[in-house]
Amino acid sequence: MIEQQNQISQGKNVFLTLLPGVLAIFIGFLIMGMQLPVLPVYLHDTLGASTLMVGVVIGSQFVAALLSRSWAGNFADIHGAKRATVIGLLVIAASGILYLLSLLFLHTPAVSVGVLLAGRIVLALGESLLVTGAMGWGIGLVGARNAGKVMSWNGIAMYGAYALGAPLGIAFNAWGGFFGLSLAALLVPFLALLIIARVRAVVPTSTTKTPFYSVLSAVWKPGLGLALCSVGFGVIEAFIALLFTAHHWGNASLAFTAFGLAFIVARLFFGHLPDKLGGAKVALVCVVIEALGQLLIWRADTAMLAYLGAALTGFGYSLAFPGFGVEAVRRAPPQTSSLAMGAYVAFLDISLGITAPLAGALAGKWGINTVYLASAGAVALSVIMALLLMAGRKNQA
């Protein structure tokens, strides 16, 4: 009884320690969540961009984030994870300036799209610093033994922000059009800076730059599992709004909400399982659930079935991320926690950066629904990586 009470108390202490950083992640990703139901339609309908170009603009964020992960991870390890988090929020705010600037070129849509593309790249740099810094900061505050909890709570913040951000983005767009959305991107990050201002920093974990490839070689197996299962999230983020528009189903923002709420429910009730049972075992079950969700969206003939498919995708993906992530942390050198997180999340960037333009080309040739059939196949392949990780653990034992 006393031991159980101590565990509950320890869990509360971990949560309270992580809370300011988690809120910073939430606010940073709220900016991205607000754009999800608005930006693809704005690019396609207002600026006349093709589905391929929509995919390029959306996917550019993840390509830029990928290319900046090594720099962001080393910056956080050498100069401090809190400093990386603060600078990341400021850079996210700067993306709002570029979004506002794009509105000056509505009479030349190609230029406006180009400025938006630059804004997405700046947003990616800020997101890279924010995520790498906040996760490294969290692990530094509560210890590597709680790495699964760090990833779970930060994941709740990220996808909770997507769930709330989607309808909020629709509301801002209805109020002030793309100008209202851009203004929010500029101003909202400063709220996060106020929240984390008085939280203690952790001592930098490194004094020299660590080669990215040395950490990458340690985390590539769980990273590849993450890349494959992230395809399901990527096609929802980039194309679910266009799917709803094509079928005249109405409110696409509820699909993001269904995804986000299911994601949060899974993390709240089952987020402890990767640390307790093993990341690979949890990931194996969850990617199967995610693939079923993608198949349901592919076959959906009503908005309700699409919402259900989005919810299953969110539930499965929710624990696949920390499931593979726990395996990545276990394999990486302890003095490179931020860089290891950067290397692991880089596989998410690779996945989303490739998925968006490829899915855009696929949608242009065979229709928007086929995107979700292809995604289900990609997600199913991550089962192989989970099995390999489980086999590796048995061999080590």
Image (cartoon, rainbow, N blue to C red):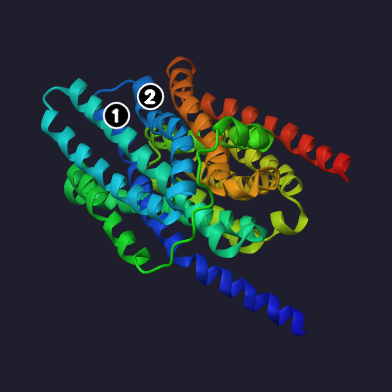
In the image, 199: left or right of 223? left
Q: Is residue 213 visible?
A: yes
In the image, 77: left or right of 152? left
**Which quadrant of the structure image shows residue 339?**
top right
Q: Nearer the viewer, residue 284 or 393?
A: 393
Mark 2 Cα shell of 10 Å, populated few (<14), some (14-19), many (≥20)? many
Residue 394 in the image: state x and y as whole percent.
87, 42
Disc ID at residue 56: 2
CA gap between label 1 and label 2 equals: 9 Å
Q: Nearer the viewer, residue 377 or 188?
A: 188
Residue 253 in the image: state x and y as whole percent.
39, 47
Type of amino acid under label 1: Leu
Residue 336 in the image: state x and y as whole percent.
58, 46
Residue 55 in the image: state x and y as whole percent.
40, 26
The answer to whether marks 1 and 2 mark residues whose Cβ atoms lie closer than 8 Å is: yes
Q: Secondary structure at mark 2?
A: helix
Q: Could you tell me which residue is drawn at 24 percent across and 25 percent down?
A: 114
Judging by the rendered image, the residue that carries numbered circle 1 is: 117
Q: Nearer the viewer, residue 212 or 49?
A: 212
Q: Could you tell me which residue is drawn at 44 percent across and 18 percent down?
A: 361
Give above or below for 313 relative to 195. above
